[in-house]
Amino acid sequence: MRIAVFGVGGVGGYFGGRLAQSGEDVFFIARGEHLQALRGNGLLLENPDGGVTEIPAKATDDPAEVGPVDVVILGVKAWQVQEAAERLRPLIGPDTFVVPLQNGVEAPSQLAATLGARHVFGGLCYIVSFMVGPGRIRHAGMEPRVVFGELDNRPSDRAQRLLQSFANAALHAEIPPDIQAAIWSKFLFISSLSGVGAVTRAPVGVVRSIPETRNMLKEAIAEAAVVARALKIGLKENAVESTMAVIDALPAGTTASMQRDIMEGRPSELSAQSGALVRLGKEAGQAVPLSLYIYSSLLPLELRARGKAEF
């Protein structure tokens, strides 16, 4: 397939790199030093065992140089999705579809508002990975997994072609029976891990081992599940327990990207995670006191990172 990766960070860089390594026709859309490194040295993927894979990369900062592709893998941060949607237009042909892999639940609707629903899939991924330098991505943990599908859950040839491309790259990918339920199942995991981790400033091994903070994790997951069900999302009955099982299986040193961004003074996905639960909870008529506490506690740091508050 002809694939564009827009946003070559921990997620886009890893999955795009693996697809390129397998022989897919991949174009990386990047900027600045990251772009120069991709052009000069290719993409470097660090594995959890310490090994490094060097992958030649076709990279540009101008989507018009690439033109229409079969699929766009969108790896930008959640708060960058709406801006990215406009820049994607040169990549969109009659049957092109965008697979958003952001943490959150709002990216598909944001993309559909700009590009049209037929050009948008639902998507999510599970991986602990991040950029450690220009052109260099570290896979730090979790078995990489990608989940995607048509927004109306209908079977399609284009979804099957992408599934096969991931299989050719020896990547675990799946098309679920209900993409919205799958997106929300991931959201239960990432919003709780991110929010509690950012408030406590501790890795997951610490948070889950202290009874008080472990209870915070459970409460955060439960709040997200209540909102999802109020919005008619078909979560499984054991969603809270299964989410805690995933968290318990993480490497002890794991931190979420939102947590790392807040701790390091960078703009984060706070609005798309804790903030989204507050907004959607209000829309659904469900109180989310813990999510409101987390969002409100972290908001001053978020505003400072965005230059909107000084202290």
Image (tube, rainbow, N blue to C red):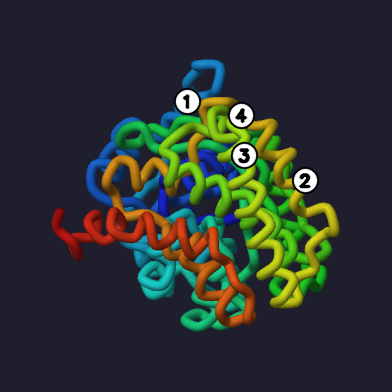
Q: Secondary structure at mark 1?
A: strand
Nearer the observer: mark 2 or 3; the answer is: 3
Q: Residue 9: x, y in percent?
A: 42, 45
Q: Is residue 33 above or below residue 302?
A: above
Residue occupying image coordinates x 58% and y 78%: 94
Q: 239 or 215, which is in the foreground?
A: 215
Residue identified by numbered label 3 = 214
Q: Earlier in the sequence, mark 2 or mark 3?
A: 3
Q: Badge 2: how crowded within 10 Å, few (<14), some, or many (20+)?
A: some
Residue identified by numbered label 2 = 242
Calculate the distance from the C-alpha at mark 1 to the C-alpha at mark 3.
31 Å
Q: Residue 37: x, y in percent?
A: 29, 36
Res. 231 visible in picture: yes
Residue identified by numbered label 1 = 46
Q: Are marks 2 and 3 in contact (CB under 8 Å)?
A: no
Going by the numbered disc 1, the residue's amino acid type is: Glu
Q: Earlier in the sequence, mark 1 or mark 3?
A: 1
